[in-house]
Image (cartoon, rainbow, N blue to C red):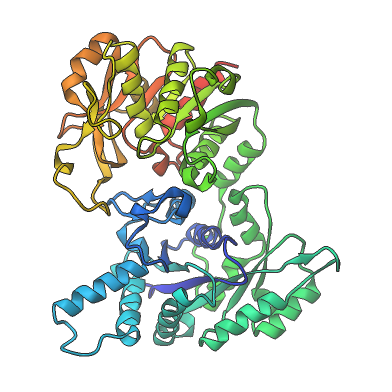
Amino acid sequence: MVKTKYIFVTGGVTSSLGKGIIAASLAKLLQARGYKTTIQKFDPYINVDPGTLNPYEHGECYVTEDGAETDLDLGHYERFLNVPTSQANNVTTGRIYQTVIENERRGEYLGKTVQVIPHITDEIRRRMCILGETGEFDIVITEIGGTVGDIESLPYIESMRQLIWHEGESNALVIHLTLIPYLAAAGELKTKPTQHSVKSLLELGIQPDILVCRTEKPLNTEIKRKLALFCNVQDNAVIEARDLSTIYEVPLAMLKEKLDKVVLAKLKLKSIVEPQLYQWRDFLFRLEHPKSEVRIAVVGKYVELPDAYKSISEAFIHSGASNECDVQVKYIHSEYLTDENVAQKLKGFQGILVAPGFGPRGIDGKLTAVKFARENKIPFFGICLGMQSSVIEFARNVAGLTGAHSSEMDPNTPYPVIDLMEEQKKITNYGGTMRLGAYDCELEKGSLAAKAYGKLKISERHRHRYEFNDAYKNQLQEAGMRITGINPKTKLAEIVEIANHPWFVGVQFHPELKSTVENPHPLFVAFIAAAMKLN
């Protein structure tokens, strides 16, 4: 059995360089070479998890199978590796301090003064090794959030230094992702920011083994040698990471740059199999050579920040490639969608998706979008609050329940067709207390959902407090709404459909979270296929 190897990915010069994509791409290549690989993210913010963060602050909150509310980078990890992540794959400073303080309150430090070193750094190191100690993985890649030099990241850098010292050179390495800016006025690439970034790492006791350099222009041999010389790395350890048209090209670009070979050599490992990546290449070919095109409107209230709906946008890419179709997504702000302008704003779309969300802002626009899709027979897909919106709209305008609403939006509604889950009514803390993670669902035979999945028993991930109110089930069914997905334990509705519509599906869960390159989500695939029929 191979001793678990540890790879750390740090970032320098600026944020948003794509550490998560580089980590996921490397993991994909190592996986393709026969090594069981996983990725974890260490975030320097003090929130215990992103669950209570506004999407405008942090983008999408990604939910794992076991119910962890995590950073959106875990979505990239799963989409690339096609392997589920868990609670252990995302750690925050808040969680670290919470654990240490709880230990101190229990008297586990025997009266010692609790300090950043060794108590905080010891807890970070323990968390860094949890996945490696399970025996399930040969290689654990750890992405360190933030940028080298940030005050918040210093305990992580120190913990990383200690772990590398403890594990030994051939069992751990550091990849430093940095920027090589192009100055148009000078007409040249500049290496000085990277040199300063590496210098900052060296001052903290870390010598990077590999430099991955984000750049607009190709790095010539002279620049690579200069970086190697002044950053104290080998020539072949300077990796060019050019800007690409899609993140899914990055694994093949890193394969061409031999990043995986350099990593294996430094870890004293040999390739078990040669990477073929046939399915990945086929996906990219379909993505780059579509045979048709559809326009999809995504109606939501966080549309100013695309990362708020990251998994949805990626699921459209996967399902589009599966259908050999170019999916053109346009985000429509629900707060500005009205009965007066809906026909103009949603004109020309072959499909309408009403997105998840919380709170009353923008809910009227979502209801307007649902009604437009239902009445005009446009393929409709509602996710979480989008599903709840479809139930509210149908109850009001078809079932005759005037004033029907969700008790989240209107506590005094005469017909709370969406209501707070019973177990949620006594909860006062918001963090980590929703219905989270994977739950089973049984599908009705012959339904659109059953046809999409090709089976009658499924499991999907949830993140919500409010549910379909079973008290109105019979009234809505008599009016023509079908309950086609049921939780086998609670018997509550998970999926609704409308019979006299070409494709109208609302789901309480989040199917976008399980869509990957190798397994596009069947509901997204079916939705795009239905939209293509309108062309």
Which residue is rendered at x = 57% and y = 79% of the image? Answer: 209
In-front residue for pair 469/265: 469
Which residue is rendered at x = 33% and y = 16% of the image? Answer: 394
- Note whether 245 is above or below 393 in the view shown: below
In-front residue for pair 316/172: 316
- Note whether 186 is above or below 500 in the view shown: below
Position of residue 67 measured from the top left corner of the image (x, y, whole percent): 28, 51
State the residue lying farthest toward the front: 412
Q: Quadrant of the C terminus?
A: top right
Position of residue 362 measured from the top left corner of the image (x, y, whole percent): 43, 33
Q: Quadrant of the N terminus?
A: bottom left
In-front residue for pair 63/152: 152
Total labels drawn:
0
- Which of the 4 quarters of the picture holds residue 191? bottom right
- Tell me, yes or no, if residue 207 can be seen here: no
Position of residue 61 measured from the top left corner of the image (x, y, whole percent): 40, 50
- Tell me, yes or no, if residue 117 can be seen here: yes
Report the side of 233 relative to 435 (left or right): right
- Which of the 4 quarters of the picture holds residue 502? top left
State the residue lying farthest toward the right: 186
Report the side of 393 relative to 339 (left or right): left
Position of residue 460 measured from the top left corner of the image (x, y, whole percent): 31, 39
Report the side of 1 relative to 311 (left or right): left
- Note whether 412 is above or below 379 in the view shown: below
Which residue is rendered at x = 52% and y = 38% of the image? Answer: 318
- Note whether 195 is above or below 364 in the view shown: below
In-front residue for pair 406/29: 406
